Image (tube, rainbow, N blue to C red):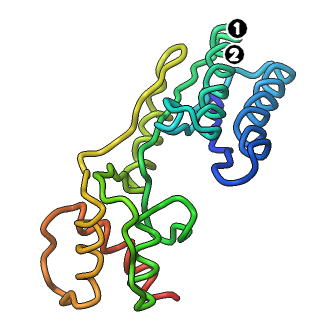
């Protein structure tokens, strides 16, 4: 018989300070209370963010949730893996929420102009790659409490990202991709252009 696995992805990154704190900290506290009451020993995978390293309310709420989980791991002797994610993108992501890729794909698919507010390098992580990492974590749980920064080699300037996405409407059907990143980005773009 396999062990229980809890993937804790609850969180709020837009809202009032109170909503953001409740979304990460209170839900994590409630999860641990439930585990204590049921006397289960699940392997917990917490979806966190690299923002846990900054002083924003969202970052602080993620860091506080991590502290609660670290304490629980020690007290209850349960394995907990914290996955701190970079910028995740993929098919049908919500535009104008927290992904520049979703914003650009949606706007280009709608024939709208895009504006770049800050042209900086961003590290992007494709959703299917993240799912594969989570599956590996489920199949090979670690011991105790661990924090892993989950990123990829796909780092790009926002202006280069915009230019790549802008090229997609004119793309030929059998044209080869220059990289697996471009192919993933194109699949993401198509999820907006073909179903809107």
- Classify the position of the N terminus by image quarter: top right
User: Which residue position is annotated with label 1?
Assistant: 75
Image point (40%, 74%), residue name: 104
| Residue 26 visible in the picture | yes
Q: Position of residue 43 (x, y in %)?
A: 60, 26
Task: In the displayed orientation, state which residue is furthest to the right.
Answer: 37
Question: Which sits in the foreground, 117 or 129?
Answer: 117
Left or right of 64, for residue 116: left
Residue 6, above or below 194? above
Q: CA distance from mark 2 to mark 1?
A: 5 Å
Do tag 2 and tag 1 residues touch (Cβ < 8 Å)? yes
User: Which residue position is annotated with label 2?
Assistant: 72
Residue 41 sits in quarter:
top right
Image point (65%, 10%), residue name: 77
What kind of element bears circle 2? Answer: helix
Residue 124, above or below 114? above
Image point (75%, 22%), residue name: 40
Question: Which sits in the foreground, 8 or 168?
Answer: 168
Image point (67%, 13%), residue name: 71
For mark 2, does the 10 Å Cα neighbourhood hold few (<14), some (14 to 19), or many (20 or more) residues?
A: many
Tag shown at residue 88: none
Residue 46 sits in quarter:
top right
Left or right of 131, for residue 123: left
């Amino acid at each position: 018989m396999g062990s229980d696995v809890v993937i804790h992805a609850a969180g709020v990154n837009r809202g009032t300070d109170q909503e953001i704190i409740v979304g990460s900290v209170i839900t994590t506290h409630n999860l641990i209370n439930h585990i204590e009451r049921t006397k289960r020993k699940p392997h917990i995978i917490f979806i966190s963010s690299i923002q846990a390293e900054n002083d924003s309310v969202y970052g602080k709420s993620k860091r506080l949730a991590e502290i609660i989980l670290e304490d629980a791991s020690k007290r209850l002797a349960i394995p907990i893996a914290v996955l701190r994610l970079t910028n995740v993108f993929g098919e049908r992501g919500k535009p104008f929420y927290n992904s520049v890729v979703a914003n650009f794909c949606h706007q280009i698919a709608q024939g709208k102009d895009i504006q770049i507010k800050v042209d900086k390098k961003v590290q992007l992580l494709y959703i299917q790659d993240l799912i594969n990492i989570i599956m590996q974590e489920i199949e090979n749980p670690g011991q105790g409490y661990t924090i892993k920064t989950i990123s990829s080699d796909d780092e790009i300037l926002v202006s280069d990202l915009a230019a790549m996405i802008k090229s997609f409407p004119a793309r030929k059907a059998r044209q080869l991709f220059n990289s697996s990143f471009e192919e993933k980005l194109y699949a993401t773009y198509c999820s907006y252009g073909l179903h809107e």
